[in-house]
Image (cartoon, grey):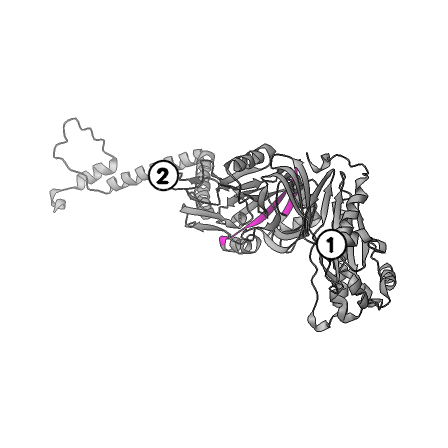
Amino acid sequence: MSRRDIPVTAPRPARRFRLTALLLSALFVLAACGAEVSSELSISEDESGTRTLVATVVEEDLEYLDGGIEAAEAALNAQLPEQLSFEGITPATDAGEEDAGEASESYLATFELEFSDLADYRSKAQALIDLAVEQEGAESDDTLGDFDSKTVEVAFEQSDGPLLDGVVLEENFTGAELLEWTSYALVEEGVVAEEDAASIISSTGTESRVVIGEEEYESSEPFSISEGTDNRFSSVNVTITDSGATVDLTSSYDADDAADELAQQYLEDTGVGQVEESSEGSWIVALDESASLQEQLSGLLEMDDLEIQVEESANTEEGTLLTTLTGTGFSCPAVCSDIPYISLDWGSDDLIPVDETVDGTTFTISYERAVRIDQVEIDTEVGLSGTVGQTYRFTVGNSQVEAFGEDLQSIFTPPEGTGSVETEAQDDATVFIATLDAAEPAELNATLDEFLPGSAVTLDGFDGIWPNYRVVTSSFGVEALGVTPEQNLQLPFMHSADQDASSGVNADLNAEQTEYLVVASGPTLTGLITLGILVVVLVIAVVLIVVFRKRIAAGLRSAQARSQAAAQQSNDTEPTAVYATPPAGLSVELLEDDAAWQADFTEAKLH
């Protein structure tokens, strides 16, 4: 049964008898060596109980008390801490002295520490130990420095679970330590000389006991009880990682194969996390972010009292989120044989440790990390003039948005004068859309060096009228945020990609990786202007031809006529062949001038 299933303990007549036996057993002390302290711890079903402390003073020690027992009793009453009740100093019975083998008279100083639960017990025990340290520091030379106080540890579990079938109690302090304050109280009240303060409390008794429910257990102090079958993990270490946490568990050194199988089965039955690694007597369980760290640790390690407070604050200048985890009740007595430990993964690339303090069952862990981005989409557009522009869509969960508040937008805002940012609300996330203005590649890369260091766009060979060029987009600045981007490339009008020469993209020029290469070709702005001019000239020519086709036709006919006339004139100026007898069939109509010319023509004129 678990500790919550311990039967309720009714008041028992034997209680006074057991306490009397405790008092009698405390009488065996060494003369003039200070009081010996024995105690009884009683724990009931609801974990409330009493710690009874009995200090024995023998007659030989009375010489150290100025004013005797009465003065000592008055001093202790005057200095009594609120955590204790004091029943006074009473003489031991003759029977007690006889049973203890003592010939001298002895006195018993009895104190009680009542607690409502184990947390109350730890708190009051810690206060008593701290009080002694405080008084010791006040009485000592300042040159000795501060005195450290131990941290009280109380581990108690009674269970019939799979790993522990029995009862376990572990403490790290004694009844004598809880009464150390009495020495300085007696000194302050003038009952004991300062040089004798260290000898007022002698040692811890040998006959202390623990009562749990109906069962009694004899134990020396500090109390250590282990009854039943104990197959709990001897070591449990929780490590905060980038994606959640890992729990490293190790079985006890004397565990056999059956115990290891039982532990393996236990981890599987919890249904919490994923057992990533398993070797002989060792397991690593990975916890994700499907539930809170508190819920998962409570389920895996049966940490019923665990409470983890999570505080987050934004550092907008650095673009980081400061997370502080404050935990209490960090113990697992039903599963762990020792107090577990929690720490940060100091080898993480994404977590920046700030503070790590573990004190028993409490801890405080602080770390910074970049804003957790769920998804990044990048559109890269190449312009006809060789400029490049980019649009980033950063998807951030609403929990992150709420943690950062309105200042989160400033993290995704491009440098002044280089672009703009706007938001788009979704069901469980917010999309921050950052647009970098189109610019020459060198200018864009200068912006990226400030906006997303590690990212760049290279554009080679984009010149001339119809170039064959290369586009390389590297988005390692996004990968540094812990996300692999989804990318798309938009080529200019009339441009096409050579799929065989490209890499990292599909036919639609989409990429699901950090870097890709596209080889493409097409006209530049200069080429399009030149082509446009040629087209315009051709269109004008066609229009002119259509509009002025009649004039053009008439002009062509006129030109043809002139050409013919010129040819005729040329023919007219050439010598005409003279035939003595006209060729047959040749009909020649002579003009009057021709006739006259013929009359005057003689053969001599040919010469």
Q: Position of residue 101 (x, y in %)?
A: 74, 55
Q: Which mark is residue 175?
A: 1
Residues packed near mark 2 inside 10 Å, few (<14), some (14 to 19) or many (20 plus): few
Q: Quadrant of residue 118?
A: top right
Q: Is residue 504 toward the left or the right of residue 255 in the image?
A: left
The residue indicated by pointer 2 is 559
Name which residue type carries label 2: Ala
Q: Is residue 465 toward the left or the right of residue 13 in the image?
A: left
Q: What type of secondary structure mainly makes up the magenta span?
A: strand
The answer to whether residue 40 is above or below residue 556 is below
Residues at marks 1 and 2, CA–CA distance in whole angstroms: 134 Å
Q: Is 334 inside the magenta-drawn segment?
A: no
Chain part drawn in magenta = 421-441
Q: Position of residue 280 (x, y in %)?
A: 48, 41
**Count of all numbered marks drawn on residues in the image:** 2
Precedes in sequence: disc 1 or disc 2: 1
Q: Residue furthest top?
A: 585
Secondary structure under badge 1? Answer: helix
Q: Quadrant of residue 305?
A: top right
